[in-house]
Amino acid sequence: MARTAFVLNGPNLNLLGKREPTIYGHETLADVEASCRATGATLGLEIRFHQSNREYELIDWIHEAREAACGIVINPAAFTHTSVAIHDALAMCDFPILEVHISNIHKREAFRHHSYVSSLASGVIAGFGTQGYVLALHRLATLVVA
Ligand code: CA2
């Protein structure tokens, strides 16, 4: 049976590819989802891909993942820098968490330099564009067979 990986996306990422292409590139979230599904297929991972602008929905998916998944790839977007609630939900997970940022948050405003997720993450990818999601799924597959 295929293992399941959740790929979670936070607020405003539904606008990916539609604004600020110099920071976030031209790919849409639908393109990212397609890449994740194609990568999942090669790695034997069933992908559950979600985006929400609501903090509680992301928390509910993290709770679901605790029951159903072998790991989470998460781009919490702005909640990265603000959400103790997402930190607490992720802290209850016993599997690898890979944090992804499309942009290099360390090259941007100071308020983006702190993440409430990184201390819980097996790895953090920032500044690799949307390719970061694919790289994170490869890393997840490596971690779950190790
Ligand atoms: O670089 C990333 O992936 C971020 O997680 C994206 C967040 C930002 O708050 C983080 O600091 C870094 C913002 C996502 C907003 O997405 C947009 C997409 C297209 C156009 C405008 C915003």
Image (cartoon, rainbow, N blue to C red):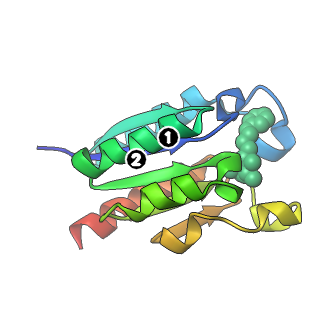
Q: Is the shortest distance between ligand 1 and the CB of mark 1 under 8 Å? A: no
Q: From the viewer's side, name the closer residue of 143 and 11.
A: 11
Q: Which mark is residue 62?
A: 2
Identify the residue at horizontal 57%, vertical 69% (top origin).
118
Q: Amino acid at mark 2?
A: Ile
Secondary structure beneath label 1 = helix
Is 85 placed left or right of 21 in the picture? left
Q: Is residue 73 left or right of residue 48?
A: right
Q: Report x, y in % for residue 18.
A: 77, 25
Q: Residue 58: which disc?
A: 1
- Disc 2 secondary structure class: helix
Q: CA distance from mark 1 to mark 2?
A: 6 Å
Inspect this view and state whether residue 52 appears: yes
Image quarter of the N terminus: top left
**Which image quadrant: the C terminus?**
bottom left
Q: Where is 132 relative to 139, above or below?
A: above
Q: Quadrant of residue 140?
A: bottom left
Asked whether, in this view, residue 145 is left or right of residue 71, the answer is left
| Picture quarter with ligand 1 | top right
Circle 1/circle 2 CB separation < 8 Å:
yes
Rendered view: 117 above or below 3 = below
Residue 63 image offset from top left, x and y in percent:
35, 46
**Which amino acid, mark 1?**
Leu
Q: What x and y, as percent, mark residue 110?
A: 87, 66
Rendered view: 142 above or below 60: below
Residue at x 57% of width, y 40% of height? 55
Question: Farthest residue toward the left?
Answer: 1
| Residue 6 falls in image quadrant | top left
